[in-house]
């Protein structure tokens, strides 16, 4: 059975003013929205400030969404009002790290996840939270999602991988590997302790292959791009092409 995955937003936190202008009601390669994705039309990965309008543009009904998995509570990945909008007419489960501070939201059941433990959302999907290398107080967790025999790594907001997270991914042979790439194709950025750049991704992928995190069938995408630190989408695609790295964009649909 195929799995449908769509990027609803692929930006870091430096949002384009065009989102309030000519791109208010449409996707655009170079006016990215806050990072967010949806699986099979019912499972959200993150739910930030642009999620409701992204769902509308992509043609999804919020009533179909049953579960929202939050990587961390930075305001570009989690916004109470966005979750409340989705849950206004039906019950939704909100999956968060065990110590996340979450306000009460009507119709929302909060499920707290311990690191490295696999949680069965239902017969179709399971999720494991893997700690990321990022700001300590609201430290993100990468998500390892398994659905209908497919494995998806959603690695937003984190530089490199922590040792145990890296070890947990050994031999997973991911079907889809999505990595933070906040920074562009240059070296020397001070953010390397909590965000990846294109050169860092180039260094990581051969090691991923060596230990079986990815293989020849794995789709590899970068997301969470900061437009102020990257060239245009078209130029970034050309830069990454030779390394078989795909560049995500808002609205991109994949079938696994």
Image (cartoon, rainbow, N blue to C red):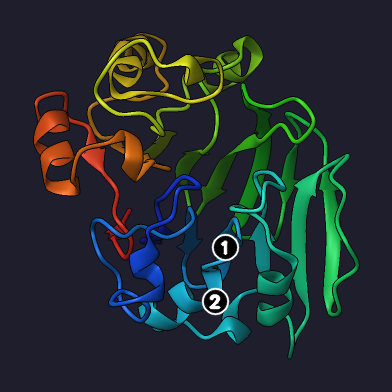
Foreground pick, 255 / 189: 189
Q: Residues within 10 Å of mark 2 (few under 14, many from 20)?
A: some
- Identify whether 207 is placed above or below 27: above
Task: For residue 3, say whether it is visible.
Answer: no
- Numbered label attached to residue 44: 1
The answer to which of marks 2 and 1 sits earlier in the sequence is: 1
Please report the residue visible at 29 percent of the width from the left and 54 percent of the height from the top.
Answer: 249
Q: Report whether 51 appears left or right of 187.
A: right
Q: What is the number of callouts on the image?
A: 2
Instruction: Give the Cα distance between marks 2 and 1.
Output: 11 Å
Residue 42 on image: x %, y %: 56, 71
Residue 205, by quadrant, is: top left
Please report the residue visible at 29 percent of the width from the left and 48 percent of the height from the top.
Answer: 248
Residue 3 on image: x %, y %: 40, 60
Please report the residue visible at 38 percent of the width from the left and 16 percent of the height from the top.
Answer: 208
Foreground pick, 240 / 68: 240
Label 2 sits on residue: 52
- Identify whether 107 is placed above or below 245: below
Residue 62 on image: x %, y %: 58, 82
Determine whether label 2 and label 1 are within 8 Å by CB: no
């Amino acid at each position: 059975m195929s799995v449908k995955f769509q990027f609803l937003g692929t930006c870091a936190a430096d949002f384009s003013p065009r989102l309030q202008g000519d791109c208010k009601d449409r996707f655009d390669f170079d006016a990215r929205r806050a990072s967010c994705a949806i699986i099979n039309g019912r499972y959200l990965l993150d739910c930030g400030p642009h999620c409701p309008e992204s769902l509308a543009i992509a043609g999804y009904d919020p009533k179909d969404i049953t579960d929202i998995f939050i990587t961390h509570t930075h305001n570009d990945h989690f916004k109470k009002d966005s979750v409340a909008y989705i849950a206004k007419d039906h019950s939704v489960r909100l999956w968060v790290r065990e110590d996340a501070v979450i306000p009460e939201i009507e119709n929302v059941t909060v499920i707290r996840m311990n690191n490295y433990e696999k949680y069965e959302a239902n017969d179709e999907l399971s999720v494991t939270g893997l700690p990321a290398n990022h700001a300590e107080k609201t430290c993100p967790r990468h998500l390892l999602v398994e659905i209908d025999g497919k494995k998806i790594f959603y690695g937003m907001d984190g530089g490199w991988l922590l040792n145990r997270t890296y070890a947990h991914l050994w031999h997973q042979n991911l079907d889809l590997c999505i990595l933070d790439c906040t920074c562009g194709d240059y070296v020397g950025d001070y953010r390397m302790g909590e965000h990846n750049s294109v050169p860092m991704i180039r260094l990581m992928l051969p090691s991923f292959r060596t230990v079986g995190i990815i293989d020849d069938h794995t789709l590899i995408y970068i997301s969470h791009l900061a437009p102020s630190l990257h060239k245009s989408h078209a130029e970034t695609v050309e830069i990454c092409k030779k390394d078989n790295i795909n560049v995500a964009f808002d609205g991109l649909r994949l079938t696994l």
